[in-house]
Image (cartoon, rainbow, N blue to C red):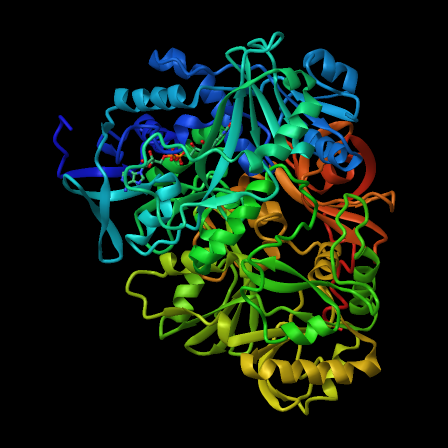
Amino acid sequence: MAEKLPARARAVIIGGGIIGCSVAYHLAKAGWRDVVLLERKTLTCGTTWHAAGLVRRVLPTYGLTRLAKYSVDLYLGLERETGQATGFKQNGSLGIATNPDRWEEFRRGASMAKTCGIEVHEIGPDEAKAMWPLLNAEDVLGAIFFPADGQANPADLTMALAKGARMGGVRIFENTKVTGVRTKDGRVAGVATEHGEIAAEIVVNCGGMWAREIGLMCGVAVPLHACEHFYVVTEPIAGVGADLPVLRDMDSCAYYKEDAGKLLIGAFERTAKPWGMDGIPEDFEFGQLPEDFDHFAPVLEGAMHRVPALETVGLQTFFNGPESFTPDNRYMLGEAPELSGFYVAAGFNSIGIQSAGGAGMALAQWIVDGEQPFDLWDVDIRRVQPFQNNKTYLFHRAAEALGLLYDMHWPYRQPETARGVRTSPLYDLLKARGACYGEVAGWERPNWYAPAGVEARYEYAYKRQNWFPYSAEEHRAAREAVALFDQTSFAKFLVEGPDAEAALQRISAGDVAVAPGRIVYTQWLNENGGIEADLTVTRLAEDRFMVVTGGAVAVHDFDWLRRHLPENARASPRDITSSLAVIGVMGPRSRALLSTLTEADLSNEAFPFGTSREIELGYARLRASRVSYVGELGWELYVPSEYARGVAEAVLAAGEDFGLRPAGMHAMDSLRIEKAYRHWGHDITSEDTPIEAGLMFACRLDKGVDFIGRDALLRQKETGVAKRLVQFLLEDPEPLLYHNEPIVRDGEIVGYLSSGNYGHTLGAAVGLGYLRNEGGVDAAFVSSGRYEIEIAGERVPARASLRPLFDPKSERLRA
Ligand SMILES: Cc1cc2nc3c(=O)[nH]c(=O)nc-3n(C[C@H](O)[C@H](O)[C@H](O)COP(=O)(O)OP(=O)(O)OC[C@H]3O[C@@H](n4cnc5c(N)ncnc54)[C@H](O)[C@@H]3O)c2cc1C
C-alpha cells in the first residue's frame, strides 16, 4: 500500500466489488470529494470477477426494474466517460417458455415491461429458432425477446466505475481489510483497518458475502448466506457469434451466454448448495470452489436437450464460485435501523452486475440527502427482521432462494424452508381447524382454511388456485355472519411519557390529541408529504399511546418513529409485539356473538366505531378495539399472549350459533380491497401523498401542529395532483388480478395496479392503482375515461371509481 491512509474521511466504503465501486462513483458524481474505498485484497476479487455478466432491464418488481433500467443507461455511456472498456453490448435476451404457466408468467412480465416503456416482443418458436439457430424449439410454446438487454464484462465494468470514482476524487485502497467499525453516541464514527483507523461520519457496507460479518462488527443485521453458483464454458461452437442473444430456459434452470465464440451455460438449480458455514477463508481472493459434476449433471442433461450441438462439444471450463443470497431474494439497501450513518448495499442474489448502477445511484442519493430519495421498499434494509440474521435460518433458506430465481414465480408462493419461526398462541388451535399457513416476516399466518377431508396445501397456478372456493366462503362469513382472524402478527409499539402526545402530533398527519380510549387512523409523512407509514394510534392514557401497524413493516415503522421523535422529547417508544396476540372478530353478527362472552355494553352508543377499551371476555381481561380492515362491524381483541388461546377457544365455541368461520389472510385481502383500504408498500409508499392516495380524510391540516409533511400537502393542494389512486372492478368475472397489471385508459397505458385480488361480494377481480395524467387527475378525468386492465397481453374492460365500490358510506362499519 503506497499511499498512506487518511485519518479521516467523510465516507468510508467497505468492499471493492461492483457495488462498492458504484456507490463510490455515484458519491463522487454527487460532489462528495472526501470518500475512501477500502478493499481487503484486490478490486473485484470477491464475487464480481467471475460473474456471467448478464444485464437485464426487467426484474420482478417495478422498484427493481427502475434501478436495473438506470444501470443499462449508465453502462451505455461509461466507457466513453472513463476511457475504460466495459465489454457492455446490447445483444438482447430471449426467454423461452415450455409450458402454459411459464408462458402466462412471461406474458404478464411483458405487460409490465410495456408499462415501464421497455421494448419487448412476444414471438413464436420459429422466430425464436431463427434468432438462436442452435435452439431445439420443438417443445417451446412461445418466447419473449428484450432487444435492449445485454451482457458486460463484470471485472471491466467495475474497473470503469472505479476509474470514474477516482476521476471524481475518491481514494481507493486495496489490501486494506476493515477489522472493526467504530461507534459513538449511537452513530457510526469510523473504521479500524489493518493499517490504522479512519474517522468517518458515514460508513457503507458493500462487503458482498462478507457483509453479514461486517454488520456484526457493529450490531447491524445483514442477513445473507453464500451459495455455490455453477457455470460451464464449452469449446468454440460454430454459429455462436458475438450478437447471439442471451438465452434463458428457466423451466430447465439454465441460461446461455456467448463468450468469445463459446457458450457459457449457467444454472439456478432448484436446491442450491450453501457455502461458507465455517466462515470465509482469510486468503479468499479470486477464489474458486471445487467442481461438482453430480450436482450439475441434471442441468447439463437439460442443456443437451435444449442445444443438441452440445452433445458433440467438449467443456473447457467448469466454474463454481460463491455469492450471497438473502431470505427473500432481494438485496438490502439503506441506512441500518440499528446504527445511524451506517449504510448497507449487499446481498445481490445473482443480479449484482445488472443492479449495481441503479443501487449505487439510489444509495448515494440516500447518503447525500439523509432520506430515501424515492420508494425503495422492495430493497429497503428496514424490511429485515433481526431474527433473520440467525445462521441456521440463513443456511436453510439460502438453499431455496437461489432456485427461486428461475422457478415459477407463482402468485402467493410461500417459502418451504426455515418455516415455523414465529407462531401465534393460536397456531395449533387453528391448524387443527384446517389452517394453511403462509409466512410474512417470519410469522406463520393462516392464509386460508381447508375444509374437512381437504389437505391444507397450496396448488399453485395463475388461474384459480385450489383454495379459491374455501377463501370465498370465509369472505362471505365476514360479510354475512362473522369470521375470526388471527392478526397476532401486527406490530405494536407503546409510546409513553409526558411528551408522548406532542411527539406523536408532530409525526402523525392525523390528530392524536384525543381522549383516552379513542383510536386514530393516521399516516406518518416525510417532508415531501409521501406516506412513510399507515397505522392506528390508540390513546391508552394521558401519557400513553399504542401504535399498531403491519408485521412486515415493524422495523421500518419503529425506525421512523425513533428517528423522528423530537430531540429531548420525554417520550420513549417500546416494541411490545410479543406480549399481545390479536384476535379479529369481524362481521355483522360479531356484536351478538361477543355479547355472549362479555358483560361489557357493545352497543353503538356505548362502544362506537373508533373506540377502544379494556373489557372482560371469557376468563380474560383484554383490550377490545372497534376497528376493522375488512369494512365490517367488528372488534380487534388485544389479548396478553398467555390468555389468547383461551379467548379464541371461547369465541370459536360461542361462534357456532352465529355461523362463525375462522378466516385467513387471503379472505382479509379480498375484503379490504373491495372496500379500497390501502396497503402500505403497495398502494401507498413514500412517493405517494395522502392527496394522491385519497386519504385526506385521515389528515388534519388544521390541528394546530406543524406536523411533518404538512407544508408539502398545503403546496400540493394548491398545485393539484398528476396521479390519483383509483379502484378498478373488472367487467368479466373470470380473470384474476394480482398486481403490476397495466391500467389502460382510452387505449393507452397510464399506470399499473399496485394491488389486486378477487372481490367475492363485488363478483369480479378488483384492483387499486394510480391513474396518471400530467394535466391533472380529478373526478371528471376519472369518469370521462374508458378503462381496461391488461392481463398477460389481453385487455379486460374495467370500471373505475374514486369511491370504494363496496359500502362507500361505511355504513356497515358503523352499524
Ligand atoms: C457464477 C456467478 C454468475 C453470476 N452472474 C451474474 C450475472 O450474469 N448478472 C448479474 O447481474 N450478476 C451475476 N452474478 C452476481 C454478481 O456477481 C454479484 O451479485 C456481484 O458481483 C456482487 O457484488 P458485490 O460488490 O456485492 O460483492 P463482491 O464482488 O464480493 O465485493 C465485496 C468485496 O468486499 C471485500 N471485503 C469483504 N470484507 C472486507 C473487509 N472487512 N474489508 C475490506 N474489504 C472487504 C471483498 O474482498 C470483496 O472484494 C453472478 C455471480 C456468480 C457467482
Q: Indicate whether 94 appears above or below 780.
A: above
Between 516 and 396, the residue placed more toward the observer is 396
Q: Residue at x 76, y 35 (%)?
A: 104
Q: Residue at x 69, y 73 (%)?
A: 430
Q: Residue 381 in the image: x percent, y percent?
A: 44, 48
The image quadrant of residue 44 is: top left
Task: State left or right for residue 446 relative to residue 531.
Answer: right
Q: Residue 292 in the image: x percent, y percent?
A: 51, 35
Between 672 and 726, the residue placed more toward the observer is 672
Q: Residue 39 in the image: x percent, y percent?
A: 27, 34
The image quadrant of residue 441 is: bottom right
Counting labels gives 0
Q: Residue at x 69, y 29 (%)?
A: 110
Q: Indicate whether 773 appears above or below 202.
A: above
Q: Quadrant of the N terminus?
A: top left
Q: Indicate whether 339 appears above or below 446.
A: above
